[in-house]
Image (cartoon, rainbow, N blue to C red):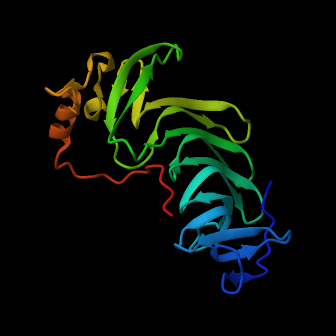
Amino acid sequence: MRFILVLLLLISVTGYSQPWKSYILSVKGDTLNRVDMKGRKQGPWVIKVESLRGERGYEEEGYFENDQKTGEWKRFSLEGVKIAEENYTWGKLNGRQRYYTYNGGLLREESWRAMDPANAYDTVSVYDVNDPTREVDRVIVKNEGFAMKHGKWTYYDPREGRIEETENYVMNKLQTADGLYGDDDIKPLKVSTYQPRTDSLGNKVVTKPKEILEYEKKNSGKKKVKVRDGSTGN
């Protein structure tokens, strides 16, 4: 349900018991756009972007947790038409996203995977393009700190609602019947053969699999190419 927002009051925490540095009140008396004492966005937010230089404005609503978007966010045109439904984890796109035209027709569905900031690397399954239930391989990717295209992307005719095209991605790589397009940066990983070694005292020694060492060697010093990476920009 949309937050029906009227900017009644911008209140400082001074003289009040609420643990917020600032917030606004909705017509229902709910506290929105909360900023905590450390300057981090928290809880329900409504963000309005005005039209500028030919770019249409919009409003979006959702939740922040420690300054990062989390859960479902919805975006509306300034006329009130829903134009996007997005899902976030760790402040990055994660899971299924839906985008609509300014007339409300479904334009495309995207699938993203957010990378856990606690992990330097991640492994994912690769499924048969003709049989999505059959795992054919696993690949390893380095955590670059953003989300990656991962899963099925579907493009629609927004007027008729029919599917025009589908694509399947594995960690930003387009999957075809012959494999992964442009798969030089990800390598198969035999997960079952990777076992941590132990020292003479029985303590585990963290060692990197050969595939990771090869990845780091090959990609060291590479220039970054800016692409849409699923981050919020906030």
Residue at image point 61% right, 40% down: 108
Q: Residue furthest bottom?
A: 15
| Vertical side of 217 occupied by 53: above or below | below
Q: Quadrant of residue 8?
A: bottom right
Q: Is residue 65 left or right of residue 226?
A: right
Figure check: 15 above or below 98: below
Q: Is residue 121 left or right of residue 86?
A: left
Is residue 55 placed above or below 217 in the rendered structure? below
Q: Residue at position x 47%, y 53% from top?
A: 231
**Percent x, y of residue 80:** 78, 61
* Extreme residue in the front direction: 201
Image quadrant in which you'd find residue 179: top left
* Count of residue discs: 0
Question: Residue 74 at what x, y percent from top left?
Answer: 68, 53
Residue 170 location, x and y as percent?
A: 42, 31
- Answer with left or right where residue 82 lies relative to residue 51: right
User: Whole-percent x and y of residue 117?
Assistant: 40, 47
- Residue in front for this viewpoint, 123 or 38: 38
Q: Nearer the viewer, residue 171 or 103?
A: 171
Give the answer, above or below, for where 218 lies relative to 180: below
